[in-house]
Image (cartoon, rainbow, N blue to C red):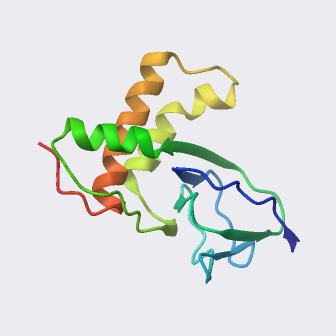
Amino acid sequence: MEKAPVYPPDQAILICVSLMPASIGQWKALYNGRSVGVTRPIRFATTFIDLNCRMEMWVRGPFDYLHYYLSRELLERIAIDNAMVSTIQLRETFFVEDAVVAEITKNILSSVERGEPLDKLALDQTATVLGAHTLQARCGAPKFA
């Protein structure tokens, strides 16, 4: 296994979506002092990482991923717009099935694979839906109206 580059600390959440199943033992990390890795090989397996947490990664073999970057500022705006006043505390997860993230990824994948940029409206809508979903599913926010 090779040590992967370290993500710089940031006020953001990174969502990683595996486009092809990663095999057990192909990726492992030390995340915030805890050992984590691939638990089962599934297509569109989703990982939610707080970029403020320290992480060292090791990888073996090729990967095919799509990454979404959600700034804390965006998440806070979505929370305020939906009358949710709370601190954002991510419950990080690694290589889980997430139907919402998988469907969003499938919807934009052909454009991404062709190297076509998404228009601003599509980017804004994708970021808002992903942000609201992340707040509800991974940060313990109540369901929005």
- Residue 33: name its quadrant: bottom right
Question: Does residue 46 show up?
Answer: no
Rendered location of residue 13, percent (x, y): 51, 52
Q: Going 70% across and 75% down the picture, which residue do you hit?
A: 28
Q: Is residue 90 left or right of residue 113?
A: left
Question: Does residue 38 show up?
Answer: yes
How many discs mark residues in the rendered view? 0
Rendered location of residue 114, percent (x, y): 69, 25
Q: Taking 36 as reference, is 106 above or below it? A: above
Rendered location of residue 21, percent (x, y): 64, 62
Q: Going 59% across and 51% down the picture, which residue do you hit?
A: 10
Q: Taking 79 as reference, is 136 above or below it? A: below
Compare residues 111 and 48 and report the one nearer the observer.
Answer: 48
Rendered location of residue 46, percent (x, y): 52, 59
Q: Is residue 56 left or right of residue 49?
A: right
Compare residues 66 and 6 and report the one nearer the observer.
Answer: 6
Compare residues 115 and 9 and report the one nearer the observer.
Answer: 9
Q: Going 64% across and 69% down the picture, which residue do you hit?
A: 54
Q: Is residue 63 left or right of residue 78?
A: right
Q: Going 34% across and 43% down the picture, which residue do you hit?
A: 76
